Image (cartoon, rainbow, N blue to C red):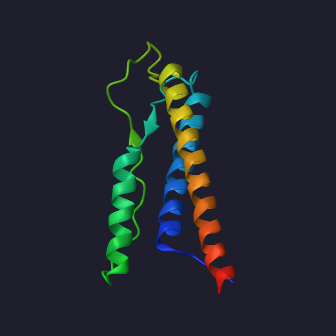
Amino acid sequence: MNVTTPISDELTKYLDLSSTQLKLTGQNMANIDTPGYRTVGFDFTDAMKHAMSDALGARSGSTLAASEVPIGQVDGLLERPDGNNVSMDREGLNMAEAQLQFRTGIELLRRENTRVMDAIHAN
């Protein structure tokens, strides 16, 4: 039996985006010494807003296509002579933020599941 709620669906999207952010940050860190490598990423807040608006449209009967995370090169970073623009300081901050977001999402999802199970057992 699969029990979901609108909140758990949104938290799942939140965790998916956090996971994608962690993967991209790891990819950037792994390529810090690759000549010509360009930092990639996405705007987490905009992607989450877009995912939530898609979910609201789907609930109201609108047929919106599933949104893809708009991953692209990050502009405005200092480029080294070899063409690489990865900043370990920036990536370290991104990693810490994405880990915190993921942990928060896990805790919120755990609480939502507890709430649903309590409601099931109360009947």
- Percent position of residue 103, x then y: 60, 46
Left/right of residue 70 with respect to residue 27 in the rendered view: left
Residue 52 visible, this orientation: yes
Residue 64 visible, this orientation: no
- Percent position of residue 61, x then y: 33, 84
Left/right of residue 61 with respect to residue 93 in the rendered view: left
Give whichever of 84, 103 is nearer the camera. 103
| Residue 26 found in image quarter | top right
Give whichever of 57, 68 is nearer the camera. 57
Vertical comparison of 88 with 70: above or below: above
Left/right of residue 44 with respect to residue 64 in the rendered view: right
- Quadrant of the snapshot with the N terminus: bottom right
Task: Looking at this view, name the residue that lies furthest to the front.
Answer: 122
| Residue 80 found in image quarter | top left
| Residue 38 found in image quarter | top left
- Percent position of residue 114, x then y: 65, 66
Residue drawn at 40 percent across, 43 percent down: 42
- Quadrant of the snapshot with the C terminus: bottom right
Residue drawn at 53 percent across, 67 percent down: 8
Left/right of residue 23 with respect to residue 71 in the rendered view: right
